[in-house]
Image (cartoon, rainbow, N blue to C red):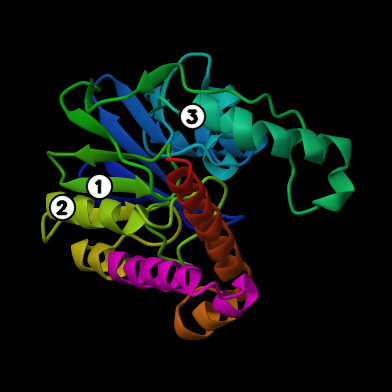
Amino acid sequence: MTSWTEIAEGVFHRRYDPLDISICLVRGTDGLLLVDTRCNPTEAEEIAADAALVSDQPIRWVVNTHAHYDHTFGNQRLAVGAAIYGHHLIPAHFAAYESPRLNAWAANPQAQPEHDWRGVDLTPPTRLVSSPTTVDIGGREVRLLPLAPGHTDTDLVLHVPDADVWIVGDVIEESGPPMYGSGCFPFGWPGVLEGLAALIGEDAVVVPGHGRPVRRDFVRAQAGTLRIIAKEITESFSRSEPMEFVAERLAASTPLPLHMAEAAVLRGYALLSATAEGSSTH
């Protein structure tokens, strides 16, 4: 775990284990805005304590960059005293993915010892964002931009215009490969990143969901990798190739480890199959 780094005036970044999660604080004259809450209430409590090293101001706003557990399962710790912003589809994603995952863990924690979800009370955002939204935190504005489906259908990025900092969650990964997790959209994701890169200035600081801050060129390069993966899955599906062969080929030719390549291909084939079945009924 590292200490806070001031990546721009009044914008602080810290990398937390487990999972090398990027947490950000944005300081305004009226308080602190926190981005993401980690994996459980205890980890969120750690963030709240560490925030005192940045400022004695309270955390008055929280933003979830997307619905996945490692970015939202600490929400309950901040729900009293702070408004929690997030994509308007997070409640639906919670119901479809995170709630069943949490229930399965509660029934048999030994089966997933890597998680500590004791006492987690799934807490969705209190302010649901469906269009570009500006939050005034006192002396500065933070823009919240919901994205089209990519890493998930709940992705939301933040822009701090006066500091030219973009906080983008897991639509970008720096300390590991792109993560094709629950509810991902492999075919839309490259275009989402390409559109985002078009908004980001050359000298802007971009904070990924995991890892160190990067620049616009990194965003464009990762969009290119995602485009290659999407093309390979699409063409392999059209040739009716077995999924395991496609996953092995992707693992050998892209940054994806085999288990992540398998997840990408499985999700891609499922989406393409659904599209093909829908077309055949018309």
The residue carrying mark 3 is: 90
Q: Which one is in front, 97 or 267?
A: 267
Residue 2 appears in view = yes
The residue carrying mark 1 is: 166
In the image, residue 29 above or below residue 23: above
Q: Position of residue 2 (x, y in %)?
A: 48, 57
Q: Which one is in front, 215 or 259?
A: 259
Marks 1 and 2 close (CB-CB < 8 Å): yes
Residue 169 is left or right of residue 76, and the answer is: left
Give the structural element (helix, strand or loop) at label 1: strand
Q: Amino acid at mark 2?
A: Ile
Q: Is residue 211 magenta?
A: no
Q: Earlier in the sequence, mark 3 or mark 2?
A: 3
> Which mark, residue 200?
2
Q: Main secondary structure of the magenta part?
A: helix
Residue that appears at 46% across and 38% down: 36
User: Which quadrant, please, contains the N terminus?
Assistant: bottom right
Residue 222 is left or right of residue 20, and the answer is: left
Q: CA distance from mark 1 to mark 2?
A: 8 Å
Q: Is residue 243 magenta?
A: yes
Residue 220 is left or right of residue 37, and the answer is: left
Q: Which residues are magenta?
A: 223-246
Q: Position of residue 83 (x, y in %)?
A: 41, 17
In the image, residue 3 above or below residue 26: below
